[in-house]
Amino acid sequence: MSQQSPDRSTASPPARPDASMSLLNNVMDHSLDDGYAEASARRRADGSAGLPRTLKSKLGLAAGLVVAALVVTLGAAEARISAPVVAKEREELIDRIDAETRAADTLESDVEELRSDVSERQRKALEQHGGDQGQLVALLAGATPVEGPGVKLIVDDAKDTDQGGGGPRESTGFADTGRVRDRDMQRVVNGLWESGAEAIAINGQRLTALSAIRAAGDAILVDNRPLVPPYTVLAVGDGKKLVIAFQDSADGQYLQALKESFDIRTSISDQAEVRLPAAPSLIVRTAEPKAAGSGAADTGKGTS
């Protein structure tokens, strides 16, 4: 009976656990490029690697470190010395600003007091020298507060109004921006005067026969005082008649056209009682006839 010969072949060695990571192994084993390794070996061979070995090189390095430390130290010392000086100058500047602000406030208060005193003297002069019509003269000049029946007219920009300029109203009297202009308020005030108003105020600013309504940039000025929308116009007079007369006037129709065409918001209503303050400042002018034979006398005109 033949015997089966045993298998004499040797078994293959077991696979390495990291056999599947040959790329990573190669990177780990050769992390430094060969060129860098050769350059480092050359520096070590000729003694140029690491810190300088000669005395001259060591002294130069030490001198550079000393200079750098000296510069840093001087900079820190200078900053420390100048800090109190800068703080002192800042405090002095703040004190000067506060002092100038207080001085300006004091001057403004003095100006207001003088303006009030001058206005009071002007009112008294109008009442004293007006004779039997002293109260009427003071009323027409805006020298006294007024209260009585009247109308309340509100004029405001259109909603979502573009603040930029331009458009037809820049040259024709209308605007496509929906903003109220100074000339609009001029026509409103003139229309109220023409309709029979006895006294008028805009946003609490009393108007007189010499009041000026003009523009300064995007602002509307009344006697050099800026106003902001909405513009509330109060007028003393027969309320119902004044409303009807104004709406039928050319200026009332002009305001209605602004409302319909450019969405400017307006409302007018008669009031049982409105209160108007006195004008903050008065400008008094008189007219006197010239002597006979002068040109002014011949034409019947006076001088102002």
Image (spheres, rainbow, N blue to C red):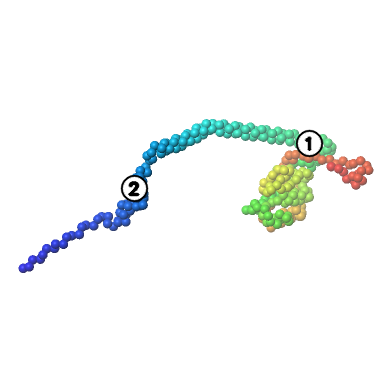
Bin the neighbour count of mark 2 within 10 Å (Cα to Cα): few under 14, some 14-19, many 20 and up: few
Looking at the picture, does residue 6 appear above or below residue 73? Answer: below
Q: Which type of secondary structure does the marked residue at label 1 adopt?
A: helix
Which residue in the protein does label 1 denote? 122
Residue 175 has which mark? Answer: none
Residue occupying image coordinates x 78% and y 34%: 121
Q: Residue at x 74, y 49 (%)?
A: 186
User: Residue 150 location, x and y as percent?
Assistant: 74, 46
Is residue 283 visible in the rendered image? The answer is yes
Q: Is residue 57 left or right of residue 218?
A: left
- The answer to whether residue 92 is left or right of residue 296 is left
- Looking at the image, can residue 235 be seen? no
Image coordinates of residue 287 in percent, x first then y, are 85, 41
In the rendered structure, find residue 41 and report the number of the disc placed on it: 2
Kindly identify the amino acid type of the residue bearing the numbered disc 1. Gln
Residue appearing at x 23%, y 57% in the figure: 15
Q: Please indicate whether residue 44 sits to the left or right of residue 238 in the image.
A: left
Q: Mark 1 or 2 closer to N-term? A: 2
Q: Residue furthest right?
A: 293
